[in-house]
Amino acid sequence: MNRVGESEYLGRIIARAGECAGRAAIGVRALRFVRSLFPDDDVQPGELRSSVSQYLFAEEDAGCEDRCVGREACRKSGLLYVVERQEGFRGGRAYVAGVAQCRHARLRRKQGVLERVAAASRIPAGMATCTFENFTTENCPPIIGQAKAAALDCVGKGGGLVLGGSAGTGKTHLAVAITQALVAGGKHAVFIPVVELLDEMRKATAAGRADEIMDAVRNAECLALDDLGAERTNDWVGERLFALVDHRYRHKEQTIVTTNAMNMAELERMIGDRGTRIVSRLAQMAFPVFIKARDYRFNRDQGTLFKAG
């Protein structure tokens, strides 16, 4: 090898060595960053399974959520690199870097889902925040916890539910939570106060569209009727309610009912005409929970129940 060839060869070796040293330094930087995220894990180089560049992107995006410039000005459309720890099937672990939505984008997405759920289920916008997550049973009578457990069973196992008791015990909150959970799971669930339903039926009847309203509610996979027994009773009301409940009973459709009645006999009296037949159907298609407790008001802002008065 002549001197020119030797010099060129040595130059390439030195350049390659510089590149390797640079990559090694970058690898050390990536490892140091991951260790800063998981200080108690003693992260090892072999546990980093993504490319070095992805860890450096995650390092660059660290703190991005706290410096958020808003949705319109975000250069990354609400996306950022994050590092997650993954547990192996047979032990071991890996630290994987990848793209995820930022905290603000997730909150916007969650709010959008709540708005769509409310629109799809007829839930008033002001009640869209009624979920199982913010229904606490702490410092409440045991029956409040039993009511929540029964409502959760409606989502997980199906079946109907009658939630009875005085005002302020969270019955409507649980009915809305059931509806939202079912809609979020892809089911056609409808929540509607009985008085409002009957008003719509009257208007639809006058306009010759009565069947449209009846079909919309009686064929829903889950129908939550709020405040049954509060309506003014007459022959027409009794007929409409019986036709609705009887249809859902015969087709084994999930039905949720809230009422201020303290037992089934009182609910029968409150409904008035056709009350006996309606309650007979409900008793066979829904599990009854009557909350015999003092008036508890649900604070939606703080997600707590508190004693009234």
Image (cartoon, helix red, strand yellow):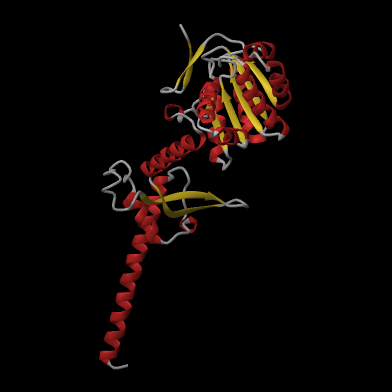
Give the x, y percent position of residue 252.
Answer: 71, 34
Q: Which residue lies furthest to the bottom in this view?
A: 2
Q: In this view, does 303 lie above or below 1?
A: above
Residue closer to the observer: 29 or 154: 154
Q: Where is residue 40 in the image (x, y as percent from the top left)?
A: 46, 42
- The quadrant of the rendering that contains the N terminus is bottom left
Q: In this orientation, does residue 230 appear?
A: yes
Would residue 10 appear left or right of 128 to someone viewing this image? left
Q: How many marks?
A: 0
Q: In this view, does 87 lie above or below 153?
A: below
Give the left or right position of residue 240, taking residue 63 as reference. Answer: right
Q: Quadrant of the C terminus?
A: top left
Instruction: Name the image quarter holding residue 267.
Output: top right
Q: Which of 278 and 44 is in front in this view?
A: 278
In this rendering, does residue 146 appear at all? no
In the rendered image, which quarter is residue 151 located in?
A: top right
The image position of residue 10, as x and y in percent, is: 30, 82
The residue drawn where x is 36% and y is 41% is 104
Q: Nearer the viewer, residue 264 or 10?
A: 264
Rendered view: 66 above or below 44: above
Q: Which of the pair 87/236 is nearer the observer? A: 236
Q: Position of residue 223 (x, y in %)?
A: 60, 31
Q: Residue at x 48, y 30 (%)?
A: 123
